[in-house]
Image (cartoon, coloured by chain):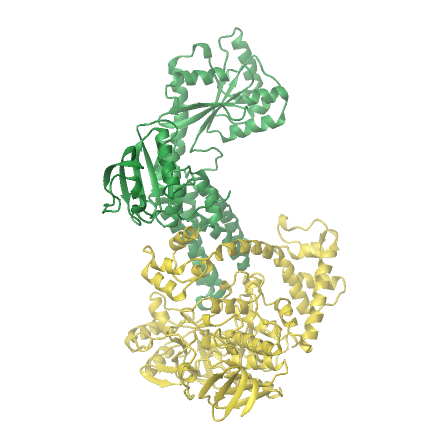
Chain colours: A yellow, B green
Amino acid sequence: MKNFDIIVVGGGHAGIEAAYIASQFDLSVAIITIPGIGLGSAPCNPSVGGVGKGQVVREIDALGGLMGILADKAGIQFRTLNESKGFAVQSSRVQIDKEVYSLEAEAFIATIPNITVIREKVTHLESRGDSFLVTGKNSYSARKLIMTVGTFLNGKLHTGSEQSYGGRVDCEPSAGLKDLFAEIKTRPQRFKTGTPPRLDKATIDYSKLEEQPSDSTVRNFHCLHEPFERYVQQTSCYLAHTNSHTMEVIRANKEKSPMFNGQIQGVGARYCPSIEDKAFRYPDKNIHHVFIEPEGLNLDTMYPSGISSSLPREVQKEYVQSIEGLEKAEIKVYGYAVEYDVIDTTDLKLTLEHTEIPGLYFAGQVNGTSGYEEAAGQGLIAGANAALALKGLNPLILSRHESYIGVMIEDLTSNTRDEPYRLFTARSENRLFIREDNSLLRMRPYRTTFGLNRPIDVYQREFIEQYLDLMNYCDETMISEKSPLMEQFSGAGELQQLVRRMSVTEVLKQAWLNPISTLETILSHYGLEVSYDLIRTVAISKKYDGYIKRSEDQFEKLKKMDNMKINWEEIAASSNISFECKQRIARIKPDTFGQLKLIEGIRPATLAVVAAKAL
Amino acid sequence: MKFLYSDGPIIACSTCTLAHAAMAVIRISGFKSLSQFAPFFKKDLTGPIEPRRVYYTQLVLQGQILDDLCFTYFEGPKSYNGENILELSVHGNTLNIERILELFIKEGGCKLASPGEFTYRALKNKKLTLSQVEGLDLFLNANSGYALDQGLSLLSGNLQEIYQELYELFIKHKSSLELSIDFAEDVGEEAAKKHFDESLNAFAKKFQSLVKRVQPMDHNLIQPEIVLAGLPNSGKSSLFNFLLLEERAIVSSVAGTTRDYLTETILIEGVKYKLIDTAGIRESLDLIEAEGIKRTKKKLRESFYSILLINPFEIVEGFEELLNNSFDLILFTHKDMSGFDDAQAELVAKYPQLGSIGAIDLKSLPQAWEKTLLDQVNKKYLSVIYGKPILLDRHKHLILQAHQVLSSYQALTQHESDVAILSQELNAMGHCISELIGIVSPDQILNSIFSNFCIGK
């Protein structure tokens, strides 16, 4: 029997992230994955990043993770979302070539000598005191076990009335968690996710669609990559729209929809709705966006984002072809919904280690999250903590005040989720600070505790030194009102005239100026050459400085109230709360006012009553 | 101020204890079972006692009868504050009351209730909301029919409903903002912008109707004040005495607590006013004491109705400054003095801004004149309450604060494209509205509300 320090079950986005970070600590790591699926494969949308998620990818990258590297290497279309809405909520998103992404993942992992990839279906797992026994075709043992099994636990696929078992289309099924690991409880409520039909690339009339080309000004994710270098050929996405006919087709087939006829019992995410959801939830709305995204340069399929469905094949075809530009589109792979088991994440610690079975970690979709980025972020936390524990180092626990990963892990472990969890910027109380541009600053203190000295560490140390220098420079350098720069920076109206001597910092805070180009101009005026990354981080930090301080004050006040202990049993038993609300309280069992506030459907009247009650 | 409330049984006299009266009501709340008081009653309390029924019996201590009384038992949770409550209707001699309280405290395991503790328990047991508690406070301390009405309206939850509607509209707007950040791609920019604008308009409209009810005034409508101001010998004291002598409904006469002024209470058309003679002006002017002037000005600013009296024969330095305060009424006195017309003409020529001013002879004022003056005060009062002003300071303060935030937020939406900054500004408004509906931290509640309550409520 082969022994490893750490075994990761699953080779998806969480699995490879866990394995890679753990491998940096000179431990022997194994990934055991189902044969026939490449590492880091993308079964759903062909993109990495997005609002909130772009921040996660950069956090992963700054902590020494893998996702940013792979996304850059496989990126075929780059975009900045929310570009006009301010730096704090801007996020990068990269359309990836799925084939290239997985090949890059395989190649990358293959270069790491202390990671062994084992392609076997795991049939039995057992905890043996301070080690775990993992059985597939062969038996293996490990001191730490990380479960990143995605949607494969008791996975059940639905397309119309057709049902099959497995975690995704054309894959072998795997057993339920209960069978594999008798000691672990899964939640009685299964989750559900879905994916749209894939269209034949050659059968789409692109002239009728709105083209969205790749943006060459979007910075790569990985900090050691040249900011704007592209590794593969760039291509475009296209925007289409549903119409009243599309929605009529769906509404007419309600009883054939597994989601509405009772065939599917799992709960899907409300904010990642299928086209059926949209049709029935918004009966007055017929025009919905459909983004047509290439799945790969050499793959012949397009991914129509926004119309995931589990309707029968003939209905899928009819509604797809009702869309302008897709009249002749052929479906290569039909859309389906998948139901799967998830664990109760309140049984996990902030390190993602199980509270009752030490040494066992869970990460990714099995924890009830949706999205590659969410999975990868958890994989990194689980992998790092398994390794840190073996090395006798302090655990890696990211503060929710400093990172989206921290927000996610705290949300997951403190509250039983009753639908798949996806990150949004709105989940953070400190959105002005948790930005893409300062991810390195935010993550460096954590990375430092690993005690590693890899190229990324060298880069980060230098970056921070230069950052502090440039911040000081901005505070100390004064620009005279007579300088031609000031005329250049003055805006249109009387209020936007810069008529007095100011520090660079002050100039950067002027509302009408873009801080990045302003700082670039100032530095080049004084003949200073500074890297783009550095200018960007310093300029945006200066811009938000005052706002962040105010936000921190607010946060402090809120925290006081939110930390207030409450007795959920009493609240659930009280007579003036709706039945639905009581059920949610009883299920989620909130301990604090802050947790109660987060529960869906809690009415303000209830909060007021509880606030008074907690006196 | 720190409130230390306990869980055990509490007792207090809930009626006036300042003087002997025919009857008094003593309340005991929070005991486990009636039987624990069995030794003090002639009637057998261990037997069946029907809740909400009046029983007649005697209070006894070691065989000696202390008082004849009636009691009513309210069984929790169907009681005022959700606890078991025993109400004793006893004879209202203050010594008798004290003796009974002492009996239950020394022998019955009760604790003398802290101010507002009965009501505090009602809040704690969700029998009353925060607004209702505030309404009760207003109701019990009302000095006018309007304050009584608003107290009752708060008690019945009317205002609370408006706040909740406002909160829902706020949440709608807040989510439209979040929608435009996190789901702009799904929803589309145009639709997101439409949501944003519509929800903001709906919120602002509702909010404006509430703001109209909060006049930015310094005076206190719960205890309105009529302030008399003027230089020495201007006739303030004469007017003060004149109004009081003719006014039959004097309730109490309390000397000013701060040497600066004298205070009396007068009743005009069912509203209790404080009548204040600001002697402070005289002293401060004589002593040229800046602090005194400041205090008088504050008093004038906070007054509901201010009257300036002028003796045209004695205009001294500092008079101009006095005129800078806008008065509701300016009166010339000393009409009975010879040469009055000349002096008045001279003064009017010097201060044209005084406009048309009356002149009175305080020594021989007709009865009807008093009515004219009081009518004027009442007219102002009626016009003020016509807009249904919100009386509670905490609410006024929060509404005005939210109003300020809303104005700057609306201005910001015109030129700030950074949505994260907008959202942050909006949070400040969220806090105000949450506090309005009672989502506040314990120390805030305790300090702002229960400090007003007296023992027995």
Counting from the top left corner in percent of width and height, residue B288 is at 63, 22
Counting from the top left corner in percent of width and height, residue B378 is at 39, 26
Q: Relative to A575, is A17 on the left or the right? A: right
Depth check: A486 or A418 in front? A418
Depth check: A82 or A593 in front? A593
- Identify the residue at horizontal 28%, vertical 45% (top origin): B74
- The answer to whether residue A257 is seen in the rendering is yes
Q: Quadrant of residue A115?
A: bottom right
Q: Relative to A491, is B222 on the left or the right? A: left
Q: Relative to A111, is B42 on the left or the right? A: left
Residue A31's place in the image compared with B429, above or below, is below
- The answer to whether residue B202 is seen in the rendering is no
- Identify the residue at horizontal 51%, vertical 42% (top origin): B1
Residue B196's place in the image compared with A364, above or below, is above
| Residue situated furthest right in the rendering | A527
Depth check: B109 or B452 in front? B109
Counting from the top left corner in percent of width and height, residue A399 is at 56, 65
Residue B398's place in the image compared with A344, above or below, is above
Depth check: A477 or B27 in front? B27
| Residue situated furthest front in the rendering | B62
Q: Quadrant of residue A156?
A: bottom left
Counting from the top left corner in percent of width and height, residue B367 is at 38, 14
Q: Quadrant of residue B342?
A: top right
